[in-house]
Image (cartoon, rainbow, N blue to C red):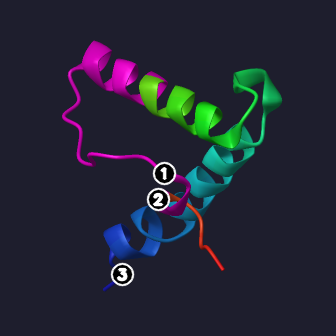
Amino acid sequence: LWDIMHGLDLGPKMHVIGNCLLQLSLDNRLGSTQAERVHRIWTRIQEYYTTFGIPCRINKFIMSSFTVEG
């Protein structure tokens, strides 16, 4: 039996989301530094969660949240 959570949600979907976040963090239109861009992305995510009544499941958002360092 195929496990959708591990097969999609924690697999290809997470890679797609991570790649989108990485591309956003490189977009100079969101700020002059990567830290500023990541902060702006996190702020928008929090606004979206609040608007749609979605409980936040993580308490911080840093580059290592969606990239592999090293």
Labels 3 and 1: the sequence-earlier one: 3
Q: In this view, does 47 lie above or below 55?
A: above
Residue 56 covered by magenta stretch: yes
CB within 8 Å, label 1 to label 2: yes
**In the rendered structure, which amino acid carries the disc numbered 2?**
Ser
**In the rendered structure, which amino acid carries the disc numbered 3?**
Trp
**In the rendered structure, which amino acid carries the disc numbered 1?**
Ile
Which residue: 59% across, 73% down? Answer: 68
- Magenta residues span 44-65
- The numbered mark at residue 62 is 1
Percent across and percent down for residue 59 are 26, 45
> For this view, does 21 lie left or right of residue 32?
left
Which residue: 59% across, 56% down? Answer: 18
> For this view, does 46 lie left or right of residue 69?
left
Which residue: 61% across, 31% down? Answer: 36
Which residue, given by chain and number where applicable, does mark 2 sit on? Answer: 65
Labels 3 and 2: the sequence-earlier one: 3
Q: Nearer the viewer, mark 1 or mark 2?
A: 1
Which residue, given by chain and number where applicable, does mark 3 sit on? Answer: 2
Q: In which quarter of the image is residue 4?
A: bottom left
The alpha-carbon separation of the residues under discs 3 and 2 comes to 27 Å
